[in-house]
């Protein structure tokens, strides 16, 4: 596979009253062709700054970037028509229908209008395409935003929080759409706080914290590198959980008491747990290693909690502002 997006040593600093703030501090990222790549990080970690810098909306202070094998921002006019992107929450004219909105964007970007019907079908808005956008829910507006980014049938699709406002059914449909797009040969860069969905849909991930990459690679590889050492322990009587936890803490284990089980770590061998509990008359009914998931890895690496479904502030940049070669700034 070849890389469709490469970032090396990207730096962006801002001067504030308190001094210089490093939004990006030597950040690196590679996205291979045909993948769904998750871009993860806590609020303020530099995700949106990275995406806006890639799209020429922010000028970096240093580093190297390329899209589809061309250096940007220098070659952005040449590749913009091959990149579809949504960064933060775009605005639409509330009195326009979805079909009218997309038709105007298609005309502005030199896209054949037959593509409007195709993308409305892709995002599940065909039956509501003649309704005014102001009657849409937040989730429907998110779908319309995705449709606008798909108009050009781009080779690279960049989506910032595309599941924001979607109900569980809509999230599942969005997951299916991302998978189908990747299967068709499109590369998708997906920023999201819904880590369970990222784990299900993404082939690879990059996690950023404080402007630096903290890990990257295939999802399975990242999980394997950060495999949890925790063990789930159940005893025959739930009433014995607290006493069992005390027995395990006496041997140096770290124990978290849950509703019907214990989460135990800092123990070299599982047999140590069974011996310690049996010596106190507590009998184990389950002893199982806990596989790492993306959320636990995220928390370990960034030291912050993910925010699911967070509503971002609306970006005032105009979605419909055309860029050279039929691209849009957002």
Image (tube, grey):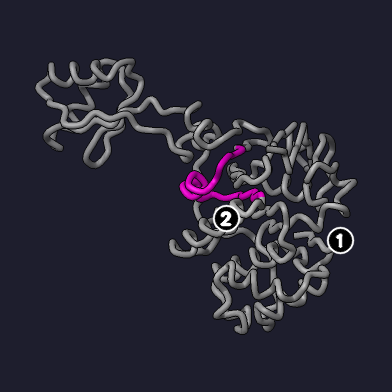
Give SS at disc 1: helix
The label on residue 116 is none
Q: What's the distance in space between the residues labelled 1 and 2, CA to CA?
A: 25 Å
The label on residue 325 is 1
Q: Is residue 209 magenta?
A: no
- The residue depicted at 75 percent of the width and 31 percent of the height is 26
Please state if 60 lies on the left or on the right of 309 as rendered: right
Q: Which residues are magenta?
A: 187-206
Q: Considering the image in quadrants, where does the N terminus appear? A: top right
- The residue depicted at 71 percent of the width and 33 percent of the height is 28
Front one among 161 and 77:
77
Give the image location of residue 66, x and y in percent: 80, 41
Please state if 117 lies on the left or on the right of 167 as rendered: right
Give the image location of residue 191, x and y in percent: 61, 49
Give SS at disc 2: helix
Q: Residues within 10 Å of mark 2 (few under 14, many from 20)?
A: many
Residue occupied by mark 2: 178
- The residue depicted at 62 percent of the width and 72 percent of the height is 120
């Amino acid at each position: 596979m070849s890389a469709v997006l490469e970032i090396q040593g990207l730096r962006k600093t801002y001067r504030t009253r308190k001094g210089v703030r490093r939004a990006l501090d030597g950040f690196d990222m590679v996205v291979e062709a045909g993948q769904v790549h998750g871009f993860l990080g806590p609020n303020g970690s530099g995700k949106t700054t990275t995406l806006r810098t890639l799209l020429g909306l922010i000028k970096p202070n240093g580093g190297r970037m390329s899209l589809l094998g061309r250096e940007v921002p220098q070659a952005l006019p040449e590749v913009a028509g091959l990149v579809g992107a949504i960064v933060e929450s775009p605005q639409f004219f509330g009195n326009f229908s979805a079909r009218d909105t997309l038709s105007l964007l298609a005309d502005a970007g030199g896209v054949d209008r037959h593509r409007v019907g195709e993308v409305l079908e892709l995002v599940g808005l065909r039956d509501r395409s003649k309704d005014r956008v102001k009657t849409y829910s937040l989730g429907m507006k998110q779908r319309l935003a995705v449709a606008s980014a798909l108009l050009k049938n781009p080779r690279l699709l960049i989506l910032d929080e595309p599941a924001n406002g979607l109900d569980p059914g809509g999230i599942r449909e969005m997951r299916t759409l991302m998978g189908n797009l990747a299967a068709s040969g499109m590369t998708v860069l997906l920023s999201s706080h819904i880590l369970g969905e990222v784990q299900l849909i993404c082939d690879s991930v990059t996690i950023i914290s404080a402007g630096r990459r903290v890990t990257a690679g295939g999802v399975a590889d990242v999980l394997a590198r950060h495999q949890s050492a925790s063990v789930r322990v159940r005893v025959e009587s739930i009433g014995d959980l607290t006493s069992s936890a005390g027995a395990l803490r006496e041997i140096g284990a770290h124990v978290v008491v849950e509703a019907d089980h214990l989460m135990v770590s800092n123990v070299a061998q599982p047999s140590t747990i069974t011996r310690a509990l049996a010596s106190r008359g507590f009998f184990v009914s389950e002893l199982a290693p806990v596989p790492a998931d993306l959320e636990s890895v995220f928390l370990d690496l960034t030291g912050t909690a993910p925010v699911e479904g967070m509503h971002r502030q609306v970006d005032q940049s105009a979605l419909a502002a055309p860029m050279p070669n039929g691209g849009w700034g957002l």
